[in-house]
Image: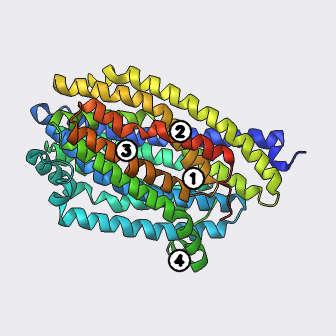
Amino acid sequence: MTNALSAPSVRRDFWRRWIVLLLTVAGQNIIVYGVNLADNIMIGRLGTAAETAIAAVFIVNQVQFLLQMIINGVADGTVVICSRYWGEKNLGDIKKAAAAALRTGLCISAVMLAVMQLIPRPVLSLFTDKADVIEEAVRYVRIVSFTYVFFAATQVLLGMLRSVECAMIGFVDSCAALVVNLFLNYALIFGHFGFPAMGIRGAAIATLVSRAAELVIVVLYLAFFDRRLRVKASELFKTEREITGKFIRVASPVMASGTSWGIAMAIQTAFLGHLDAPVITANSIASTLFQVVSVFIYGSATASSVMIGKTMGEGKDDPEGLKREIRHRAGWMQILFLCLGGATGLLLFLARPLILSFYDIGPDTERLAMQFMAVLSVTVVGTAYQMASLTGIVRGGGDTKFVFINDLIFMWGIILPTSYLAAFVFHFPPVVIFTCLKADQILKCFVAVVKVNRYRWMKKI
């Protein structure tokens, strides 16, 4: 027995759209993380001050990462609910849900901005006890924290557009930001083209300007070029109680998961940050490179969330046919996730010497960075499967609470206690501590394979 969703032409169209969305989001992410890598490398060319500057930027980026995880939760909640409405061709409710998301994102980012302007030292001292690193970090965060509001608005609007399979603007937006950021980094960090050499403050200004440019481009696209949603500015500031309630119900677990994960990552950084200075720098280098090479993994998760959500909306009138087709699509997705993980791990392992050749770092830092990246080249296979399966398939199907509960158990019940013991009780070598911090990426695979293939995550919104 067949249904409209299982027709060969419909299946071909599904996979074509999935691949296009994956490549577009991956392209956007590689530009975004490429900017971070370029920042890292340029700051890493500051000579004797390089290691302090890299460490300072890295600990500030932990605050940015916390905000990013929370705002991504808002954006992912937008994708989950809006992709379902997109499958139903309900454009009005897409705009209402996006308005609720935008208001939420702006409030969160404004609070984070106020905190980092008023009490930066107490916050940054949570990550390291190195006074020189904290002072450099304060100089950087005083400027870069103004990007938080721009970032929040941009991500929510891009999430709305992704949910209707309009992801190319995100790629174009990131390309423009890359050009602006690279030019200003080169000019302001080192003092070229008549600009003063500002070092780490120059990097902060470059980031601020590029974030503002990102938001301007998205707003201009919505105002003059978008033909799918035709959003008016007034519609993004009007909310409806029923839709807002649905958004909060769907997005709250995603935001809570992002918040929990962001705080846990900050604690992990604090563990490493209270060890020797080379450990902080090596972690910064390894983590930044990892972000760049894992873009297809994150792209696959986003694409899967959008397309599973859309499928759920399209098949709501044929539950049995929908269930059969979801099984088919989710099964193939899991195979693709594993293939992406294996390819990413190999790339990360092989790229280690080339990337480290760009840095002016000591031999101890280089040795640690090589070890950390070797660990990541193995755990990334687990990341590719469990993260894309849970945040892509399960969350896209409407079960947004499970990922939050799963993260709480693994991160707060297993990883952080084990890593604390490894670092401060048993005093294991840094590479062993780092392995403990990343072990959940493999352990979660056992949960993911059971959860996804029981198909109890298919829920109404």
**Residue 50 horizontal/vertical position (percent):** 15, 35
Amino acid type, residue under disc 3 in the picture = Ile
Q: Is residue 423 left or right of residue 459?
A: left
**Residue 346 horizontal/vertical position (percent):** 46, 23
Amino acid type, residue under disc 1 in the picture = Arg
The disc, 4 or 1, on the residue closer to the chain's N-terminal end is 1
The residue under label 1 is: 162
Residues at marks 3 and 1 touching, judged by CB atoms closer than 8 Å: no
Crowd rating for badge 2 (residues with CA inside 10 Å; few <14, some 14–19, many 20+):
many
Check the image and name the residue furthest to the bottom: 241
**Residue 400 horizontal/vertical position (percent):** 56, 58
**Could you give the CA–CA distance between mark 3 and mark 4, rounded to whole angstroms?**
42 Å
**Residue found at x 38% / y 38%:** 438
**Residue 196 horizontal/vertical position (percent):** 13, 44
Q: Secondary structure at mark 2?
A: helix
Residues at marks 3 and 2 touching, judged by CB atoms closer than 8 Å: no
The disc, 3 or 2, on the residue closer to the chain's N-terminal end is 3
Amino acid type, residue under disc 2 in the picture = Cys
The residue under label 3 is: 415
Q: Quadrant of residue 22?
A: top right
Q: Which mark is residue 445?
A: 2
**Residue found at x 53% / y 77%:** 238
